[in-house]
Image: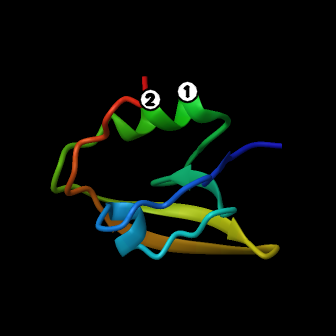
Amino acid sequence: DSGVVVVEVTDDTPAAVAKLQKGDVILSINGKDIENVANFRSELYKYNVGDTITLKYLRNNEIKEVKVKLDLKLESSN
């Protein structure tokens, strides 16, 4: 199994604008499969603020796609 589970969506973030929800499983970024959180961050950091990426995700056993404009830098949770 692969993917990253969305555990929280903060208001006014690209994830919120894209209508991602808690419990969604992100499967890929621009067609590149996501295996784990480290892989997700590594892929995401290849893009810049202002870029638009396509996320493929799983919600309620249905695979969906959404375009997300990266308008905020990710902050480390550490």
Helix, strand or loop for disc 2:
helix
Query: Which label was assigned to residue 48?
Result: none
Helix, strand or loop for disc 1:
helix
Q: In which quadrant of the rendered view does residue 33 lie? A: top right
**Nearer to us in this view, 35 or 8:** 8
Determine contact: label 2, label 1, CB under 8 Å.
Answer: yes
| x then y, percent, for residue 56 | 57, 63
Q: Which residue is mark 2?
A: 42
Q: Which residue is mark 1?
A: 38
Q: CA distance from mark 2 to mark 1?
A: 6 Å
**Horizontal side of residue 55 vs 34, given as left or right:** left
> Please, what is the three-letter code of the amino acid marked with disc 1?
Ala
Residue at (62%, 64%) from the top-left corner? Answer: 22
- Rendered image coloring scheme: rainbow
> Please, what is the three-letter code of the amino acid marked with disc 2?
Ser
**Horizontal side of residue 61 vs 4, given as left or right:** right
